[in-house]
């Protein structure tokens, strides 16, 4: 017999972030969101530096390459196709919010205010959100789930876990949901910071912090073997490397990996090491920031007045790319996403329901899904939130 103090809802959503709030929009009436913070959607307020890059332009099929590998593409496809970037735009338009596409394809609210997005999700269901309510424990019982907080217990027939991952723990996502999932029998892929800057061993370019290399070739080597290669924008920081190209690759990077950034491509090579102009000026005129050129030449013991044509062969080789050894990735406090989480092979991708525990659903960053920079994480959180909620509504056992 259950005590009379236990309140029963058809659906309980644990976590009022973007996935939980979007799920709530499709949950009917008999549900509650339990949220540990004193407000819902706290992380959303930080998104896109407070401007909220909510999704991306282009065909939804092009999104599939933005989550790491083919297995991830396969997993995210049904959710993204059922609630794509066009549907997201329509969803917010119905709530009075106009989205616009920036030149780089990123989509933001016209107001450039994350708060507007947060409020559009939260206001229609605010009576259903129990804030300052931290879930401590979740148990499967015959009739559903017992959800315990510090001061109360809830019973739900269906449970949707949207507690996020471990990134930016100050916003409330501290990995609790992973513990709940594990206790319910789910496999957890060890979480690690993603979309995070890289700290470089013995970094020599701190004075060039702020310097960017646009669409440059980035290679990652582990034990001298190349494991990843792509083109992207790189930004030098005071401690190492950042910028979208590095952030996107950070999910793969481990301490002691070598990162190589090409600064001279094969095409421009033949035009650089010729003539009487100084190597310094030729490099700077080729688009490499002067401050960085000077630091690099100092490191290679190359005189700043060396004529380009007299550059020794080994220096020519060393100038093709700059190599950095990874000390570590940045911390959870800097990571914008979480690689790892609830293993997706135990989740039905057409419903977001657990294959292990019936009536248990997952959405958002709690899952082992992390997207690249560009709005792909919020798009997945919205789409998986909607899919989990609509599935929870329709499925009966
Ligand atoms: C600084 C920053 C900028 C970002 N910018 C972008 C961007 O521009 N575009 C983009 O696509 N993505 C961006 N992201 C990533 C994106 O915000 C996240 O992927 C997304 O918010 C994940 O949503 P979620 O609902 O799964 O998790 P979260 O937003 O983390 O929400 C989880 C919620 O669960 C609550 N919770 C956790 N444990 C408990 C518990 N035990 N009891 C009760 N409640 C609990 C938390 O308090 C939190 O409110 C950014 C992330 C950061 C940190």
Image (tube, rainbow, N blue to C red):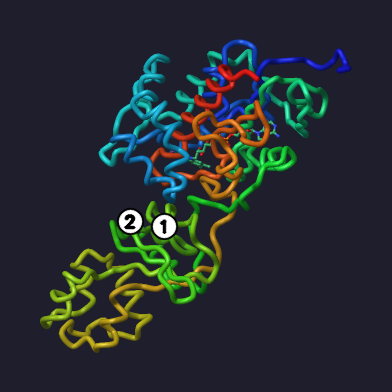
Disc 2 crowd rating (10 Å Cα; few below 14, some 14-19, many 20+) is some
Horizontal arrangement in the rendering, residue 270 relative to residue 299 (left or right): left
On the image, the x and y values in percent for residue 376 come to 42, 39
Say the numbered circle drawn on residue 215: none
Tell me whether the residue at label 1 lies in contact with that at label 2, contact meaning CB atoms closer than 8 angstroms.
yes
- Tag 1 secondary structure: helix
362 or 125, which is in the foreground?
362
Quarter of the image containing the N terminus?
top right
Taking the image as four quarters, which one is ligand 1 found in? top right
- Of callouts 1 and 2, which one flags the residue occurring earlier in the amino acid sequence? 2
229 or 238, which is in the foreground?
229
372 or 235, which is in the foreground?
372
On the image, the x and y values in percent for residue 85 come to 36, 29
Disc 1 crowd rating (10 Å Cα; few below 14, some 14-19, many 20+) is many
Q: Answer with the quarter of the image where residue 276 lies.
A: bottom left
Residue at disc 2, CB closer than 8 Å to ligand 1: no
On the image, the x and y values in percent for residue 204 come to 44, 73
Q: Residue at x 22, y 83 (%)?
A: 305
- Tag 2 secondary structure: strand
Residue annotated with mark 2: 232
Residue annotated with mark 1: 246
On the image, the x and y values in percent for residue 176 come to 69, 40
92 or 384, which is in the foreground?
384
Calculate the distance from the C-alpha at mark 1 to the C-alpha at mark 2.
Answer: 7 Å
Q: Answer with the quarter of the image where residue 324 lies.
A: bottom left
Horizontal arrangement in the rendering, residue 273 relative to residue 211 (left or right): left
Horizontal arrangement in the rendering, residue 318 relative to residue 226 (left or right): left
Quarter of the image containing the C terminus?
top right
């Amino acid at each position: 017999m259950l005590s009379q103090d236990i309140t029963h809802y058809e659906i309980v959503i644990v976590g009022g972030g973007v996935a939980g709030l979007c799920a709530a929009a499709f949950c009917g009436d008999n549900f509650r969101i339990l949220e540990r913070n004193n407000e819902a959607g706290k992380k959303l307020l930080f998104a896109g530096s407070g401007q909220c890059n909510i999704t991306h332009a282009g065909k939804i099929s092009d999104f599939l390459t933005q989550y790491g590998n083919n297995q991830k593409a396969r997993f995210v496809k049904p959710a993204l196709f059922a609630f794509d970037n066009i549907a997201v735009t329509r969803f917010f338009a119905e709530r009075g919010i106009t989205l616009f596409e920036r030149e780089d394809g990123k989509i933001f609210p016209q107001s450039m205010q994350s708060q507007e997005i947060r409020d559009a999700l939260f206001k229609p269901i605010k009576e259903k959100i129990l804030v300052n309510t931290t879930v401590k424990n979740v148990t499967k019982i015959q009739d559903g789930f017992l959800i315990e907080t510090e001061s109360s217990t809830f019973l739900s027939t269906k449970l949707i876990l949207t507690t996020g991952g471990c990134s930016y723990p100050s916003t409330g996502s501290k990995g609790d949901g992973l513990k709940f999932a594990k206790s319910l029998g789910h496999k957890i892929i060890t979480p690690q910071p993603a979309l995070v800057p890289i700290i470089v061993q013995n970094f020599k370019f701190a004075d060039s912090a702020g310097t960017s290399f646009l669409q440059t070739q980035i290679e990652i080597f582990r034990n001298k073997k190349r494991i990843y290669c792509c083109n992207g924008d790189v930004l030098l920081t005071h401690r190492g490397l950042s910028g979208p190209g590095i952030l996107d690759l950070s999910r793969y990077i481990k301490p002691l990996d070598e990162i190589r950034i090409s600064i001279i491509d094969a095409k421009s090579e033949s035009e650089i090491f010729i003539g009487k102009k100084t190597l310094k000026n030729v490099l700077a005129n080729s688009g490499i920031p002067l401050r960085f050129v000077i630091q690099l030449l100092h490191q290679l013991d190359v005189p700043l007045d060396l004529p380009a044509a007299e550059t020794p062969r080994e220096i020519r080789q060393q100038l093709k790319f700059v190599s950095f050894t990874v000390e570590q990735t940045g911390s959870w406090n800097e990571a914008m996403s979480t690689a790892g989480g609830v293993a997706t092979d135990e989740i039905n991708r057409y419903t977001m329901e657990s294959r292990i525990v019936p009536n248990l659903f997952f959405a958002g960053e709690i899952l082992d899904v992390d997207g690249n920079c560009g709005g792909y994480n919020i798009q997945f959180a919205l789409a998986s939130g909607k899919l989990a909620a609509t599935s929870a509504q329709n499925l009966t056992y």
